């Protein structure tokens, strides 16, 4: 089971802030203004070995110089002014951006930003599973850092918001299923949104047999209580990721992950019917089946069964 880690510092002490910064990014040193200028650094890290969220806030001005490690990292500015440059190349930080390895300079003025950091080995393994072949990460120091389009940039914002919010929820983030699902969604969104890896080969054009959907559905039904990724479902179907998505829509009118969600909702309902509300809560059951956001879960449950889960457990 991956270990969840949480670290946080808020300080007016420049030396303490610089030491903490180097603990998060060993290659980066932080320079702050002179003692008579106001300064406060807030830095938090929440994550597990595959993915972490780094949140940084600076009141006043500060400067960072150095290189981040060989990771896959996506940054976005939440407020204030933040500049990032690699030599003569200035990154457009008004958009979400790839934080590439390489010597860089950061300039912060009352800035707030967050950084989603993915372990490169875990990212590559997941990306290979989704793409169906090995891929090379974009070269260090590359100049293309922005999302491929505004639409995919918006999709990244939504995925990042979900990751940040869930990581902040200690109960939700403690669930293996929730963390696995977040990691999968983050990897898939990064691959679609950013020029972070070599372009994949052409999409499969194989003929999609109903037996492939049957194999995939059987796999989902057998593993519904475990972490199941889209790549796992594709492997069971013996199709590519895109192929199994197309096959499910064509045969069942839903995506593979929507089918998985429906099976988990069915499992939640069975457990709620059999549960004593004095002993077990709806939240406990929902999180056990991988539903981190309870309000969204309740609406999905109501849409499928015509009543809220709280009504089911009390009936």
Image (spheres, rainbow, N blue to C red):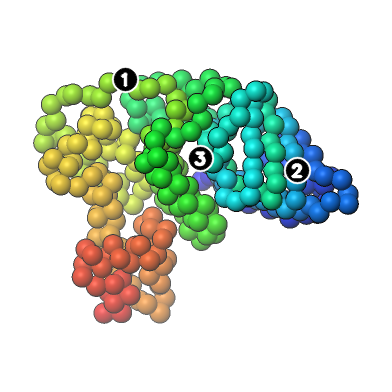
Do the residues bearing badges 1 and 3 touch, measured as CB atoms within 8 Å? no
Quadrant placement of the C terminus: bottom left
What distance separates the C-alpha of mark 1 from that of mark 2? 43 Å
Mark 1, residue position: 201
Residue 5 pos. (x, y %): 61, 49
Q: Is residue 299 above or below residue 141?
A: below
Mark 3, residue position: 95
Q: Residue at x 65, y 23 (%)?
A: 88
Drawn side of residue 141 relative to residue 191, left or right: right
Q: Secondary structure at mark 1?
A: loop
Mark closer to the chain start, 2 or 3: 2
Instruction: Give the class, few, some or many, for how many residues have Cα within 10 Å of label 1's Cα (few <14, many ≥20).
Output: few
* Residue 68 can be seen in this image: yes
What distance separates the C-alpha of mark 1 from that of mark 3? 28 Å
Q: Residue at x 61, y 29 (%)?
A: 90
Drawn side of residue 90 relative to residue 157, left or right: right
Dividing the picture into quadrants, the one containing residue 309 is bottom left
Mark 2, residue position: 62
**Which of these two is toward me, 63 or 265?**
63
């Amino acid at each position: 089971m991956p270990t969840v880690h949480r670290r946080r510092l808020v300080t007016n002490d420049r030396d303490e802030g610089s030491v903490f910064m180097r603990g998060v990014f060993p290659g980066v040193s932080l320079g702050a203004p002179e003692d008579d200028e106001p300064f406060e650094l807030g830095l938090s890290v929440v994550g597990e070995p595959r993915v972490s969220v780094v949140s940084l806030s600076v009141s006043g001005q500060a400067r960072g110089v150095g290189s981040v490690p060989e990771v896959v990292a996506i940054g976005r500015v939440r407020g204030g002014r933040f500049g990032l440059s690699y030599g003569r190349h200035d990154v457009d930080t008004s958009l979400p951006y790839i934080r590439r390895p390489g010597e860089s300079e950061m300039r912060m003025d009352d800035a707030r930003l967050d950084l989603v950091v993915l372990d490169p080995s875990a990212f590559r393994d997941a990306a290979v599973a989704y793409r169906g072949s090995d891929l090379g990460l974009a070269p260090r120091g590359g100049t293309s850092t922005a999302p491929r389009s505004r639409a995919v940039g918006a999709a990244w914002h939504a995925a990042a918001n979900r990751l940040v919010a869930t990581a902040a929820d200690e109960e939700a983030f403690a669930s293996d299923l929730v963390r696995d699902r977040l990691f999968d969604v983050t990897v898939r969104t990064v691959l679609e949104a950013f020029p972070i890896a070599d372009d994949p080969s052409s999409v499969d054009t194989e003929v999609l047999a109903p037996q492939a959907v049957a194999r995939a559905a059987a796999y989902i039904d057998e593993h519904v209580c475990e972490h199941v990724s889209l790549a796992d479902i594709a492997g069971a179907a013996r199709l590519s990721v895109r192929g199994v998505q197309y096959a499910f829509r064509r045969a069942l009118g839903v995506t593979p992950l929507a089918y998985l969600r429906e099976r988990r909702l069915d499992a939640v309902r069975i457990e709620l019917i059999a549960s004593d509300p004095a002993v077990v809560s709806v939240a406990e059951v929902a999180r056990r089946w991988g539903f981190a956001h309870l309000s969204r879960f309740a609406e999905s449950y109501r849409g499928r069964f015509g009543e809220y889960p709280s009504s089911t457990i009390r009936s």
